[in-house]
Image (cartoon, rainbow, N blue to C red):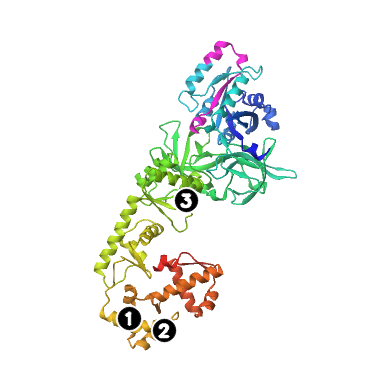
């Protein structure tokens, strides 16, 4: 298949559902020509045990272009003994084909399967009334009426009913045409065009093919990828190379959301299990807890926080605890790691795995450590139930700590380009926010202007009050300022807010001390006299200032008095304390910082020895200087190497 034709491929995946021996497998075979019962035991017993797979291919013309369409079928077991296999099959489908035999009518597994589809919010589909050739017209009519009543309050309430016979073929063409018509709605069909999400592939089967290696089969739930790409195997964390991909009998160079494909991967077959994922590296985020929206079939049911329930998520099966947070929100905890993202559907069954209790969707995979059921948290979860743009707008109103776009994007599986688009939409809609660049985050943090203004006002008020009470001090350190305004959130957020004030000129940094631009220190007569005496000494010493005891000899000031004056001078910002017995002039530190920047640029990182040789400073003092730079966040140590983290102006002022 050419690359152009691959871009015109469209896919939908439907699952069969219904009571055992109602003709699901025969119906799929009549539509696709494929018998999905492949196990000897299935042939012997005449029932489906594990999900089977088949494809119906056809072409259509859309906007003058020929499209290749693939309707994939997942034929799931109907017998109650294999309900876990059924749940694995319907965990990642676009639609459902509910099959009911006219002679039996609505049976227990019919009701449970329909309830599961309803809990999974599967709304696209059809209902096939089979074995009509074995019943008189009145019986068929009565069963249709019963089905209409049954589906009224479910997600399949609008699904049409097709009376048919697998034996005579009556009605099957009409059903096939209806299923093909589902491709006429482009908004419902996944194509290669959507690049707003990273690649997610849900594995439901794996085996070893002779001469090929490990082959996995499953569904692409989001994004696209090409052969040769590296994908993260979620169960082991290992990187795997995609050697080849195949949709039914067609080799593909690229696979995309909506397709059910087989992939040849560079993984040990023994490491792969049903329910594992292959994902883009940027999306790999294993979790043990997640907050969800969950509803129960029996509205009066209340889960016990100490009980263990069965969770069916994607094609995986986990044992979990469930805790009610408030309203329809619950927290699910698992001792094993799970892979999930916002909007993923799941089913919960009772501790004995005999009955389906309820189901829902994932809301947030970044669970706070404290106040997990507070009013604020419930408001956050409620906001997250909306589309991405609306969720951002609502969260900005309530998030006093801002929105970490990196977490928001990972939770919803949104690519950076789409995040940029969302931010532009916020600006278009006149939503007032600040975009803060924080250390360790690849994407900015969004903070509403009203919260940003409140924080800035507190900072300016504290500094103004500090200068009035301590006129002889240059300013305060960043940690002291954070404590002074009782900033309750992370130091990274505080630093980001402070940086906006430094950039705007509202606050100035001299050395490591923060102050208002208009503030001038009022030194005591003793401090002025000392500075006049010691400044020439330090200027002459350059990069290697005298130790404290050496200053005692040079100034003739007693040690205790000298140490007190040095401390006061450091508070005033006229001197900078680098180590217990080393004080520098601010301009010397600025020169050293500039030298460090040049060295890091020339060497692409540097060691203590390289710094020593280039600066001609003794090794011990070099270590003290670099550790001081590390403590301020100017440099970063990685093993024996150091790198400059930010410009010297951001740390020491201009």
Could you tell me if residue 397 is visible in this image? yes
Element type where label 2 sits in the image: helix
Q: Magenta span covers which residues?
A: 116-142
- Mark 3–mark 2 Cα distance, whole angstroms, equals 49 Å
Element type where label 3 sits in the image: helix
Counting other residues with Cα less than 10 Å from the Cα at mark 1, is it few (<14), some (14-19), or many (20 or more)?
A: some
Seen in the image, is 364 located left or right of residue 56? Answer: left
Residue identifier under label 1: 531
- Front-most of 285 and 545? 545
The part of the image, by quadrant, that contains residue 640 is: bottom right
- The tally of labels here is 3
Q: Residue at x 47, y 52 (%)?
A: 443
Q: Residue at x 45, y 49 (%)?
A: 405
Residue identifier under label 2: 540
Of circles 1 and 3, the one toward us is 1
Q: Earlier in the sequence, mark 1 or mark 3?
A: 3
Residue identifier under label 3: 406
248 drawn magenta: no
Element type where label 1 sits in the image: helix
The part of the image, by quadrant, that contains residue 577 is: bottom left
- Front-most of 593 and 170? 593
- Mark 2–mark 1 Cα distance, whole angstroms, equals 14 Å
């Amino acid at each position: 298949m050419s690359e152009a034709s691959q871009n015109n491929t469209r896919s939908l995946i439907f699952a069969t559902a219904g009571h055992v021996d109602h003709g699901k497998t025969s119906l799929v075979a009549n539509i696709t020509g494929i018998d999905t019962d492949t196990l000897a035991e299935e042939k012997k017993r005449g029932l489906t045990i594990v999900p089977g797979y088949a494809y119906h291919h056809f072409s259509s013309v859309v906007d003058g272009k020929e499209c290749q369409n693939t309707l994939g079928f997942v034929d799931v077991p109907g017998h109650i003994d294999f309900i876990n296999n059924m749940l694995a099959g319907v965990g990642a489908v676009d639609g459902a084909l509910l099959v009911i035999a006219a002679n039996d009518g609505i049976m227990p597994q019919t009701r449970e399967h329909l309830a599961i589809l309803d809990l999974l919010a599967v709304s696209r589909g059809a209902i096939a009334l089979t074995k009509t050739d074995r019943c008189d017209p009145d019986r068929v009519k009565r069963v249709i009426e019963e089905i209409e009543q049954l589906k009224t309050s479910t997600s399949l309430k609008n699904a049409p009913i097709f009376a048919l016979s697998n034996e005579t073929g009556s009605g099957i063409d009409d059903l096939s045409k209806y299923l093909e018509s589902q491709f006429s709605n482009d908004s419902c069909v996944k194509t290669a065009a959507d690049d707003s999400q990273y690649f997610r592939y849900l594995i439901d089967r794996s085996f070893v093919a002779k001469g090929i290696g490990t082959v996995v089969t499953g569904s692409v739930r989001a994004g696209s990828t090409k052969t040769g790409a590296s994908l993260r195997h979620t169960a082991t964390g290992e990187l795997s190379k995609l050697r080849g991909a195949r949709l039914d009998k067609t080799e593909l160079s690229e696979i995309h959301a909506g397709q059910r494909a087989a992939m040849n991967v560079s993984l040990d077959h023994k490491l792969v299990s049903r329910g594992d994922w292959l994902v883009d590296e940027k999306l790999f985020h294993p979790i043990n807890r997640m907050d969800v929206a969950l509803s129960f079939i029996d509205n009066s049911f209340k889960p016990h926080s100490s009980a263990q329930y069965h969770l069916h998520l994607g094609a995986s099966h986990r044992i979990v605890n469930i805790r009610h947070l408030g309203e329809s929100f619950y927290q699910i905890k698992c001792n094993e790691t799970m892979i999930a993202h916002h909007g993923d559907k799941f089913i919960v069954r009772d501790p004995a795995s005999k009955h389906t209790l309820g189901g829902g969707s994932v809301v947030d995979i970044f669970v706070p450590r404290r106040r997990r059921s507070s009013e604020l948290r419930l408001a956050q979860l409620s906001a997250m139930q909306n589309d991405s743009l609306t969720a951002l707008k609502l969260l900005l109103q309530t998030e006093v700590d801002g929105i970490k776009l990196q977490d928001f994007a990972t939770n919803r599986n949104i690519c950076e380009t789409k995040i940029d688009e969302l931010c532009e939409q916020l600006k278009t809609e006149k939503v007032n926010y600040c975009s803060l660049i924080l250390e360790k985050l690849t994407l900015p943090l969004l903070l509403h202007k009203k919260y940003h203004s409140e924080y800035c006002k507190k900072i300016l008020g504290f500094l103004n009050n500090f200068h009035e009470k301590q006129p002889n001090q240059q300013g305060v350190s960043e940690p002291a300022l954070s404590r002074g305004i009782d900033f309750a959130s992370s130091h990274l957020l505080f630093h980001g807010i402070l940086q906006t004030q430094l950039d705007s000129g509202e606050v100035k940094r001299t050395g490591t001390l923060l102050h208002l631009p208009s503030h001038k220190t009022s030194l005591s007569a003793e401090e002025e006299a000392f500075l006049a005496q010691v400044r020439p000494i330090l200027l002459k010493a350059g990069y290697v200032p005298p130790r404290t005891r050496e200053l005692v000899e040079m100034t003739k000031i007693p040690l205790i008095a000298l140490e007190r004056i040095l401390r006061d001078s450091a508070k005033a910002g006229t001197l900078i304390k680098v180590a217990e017995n080393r004080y520098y002039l601010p301009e010397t530190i600025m020169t050293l910082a500039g030298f460090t920047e040049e060295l890091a640029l020339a060497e692409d990182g540097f060691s203590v020895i390289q710094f020593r040789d280039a600066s001609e400073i003794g090794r011990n003092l070099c270590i003290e200087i670099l550790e001081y730079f590390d403590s301020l966040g100017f440099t970063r140590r990685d093993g024996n190497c150091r790198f400059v983290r930010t410009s010297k102006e951001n740390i020491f002022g201009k």
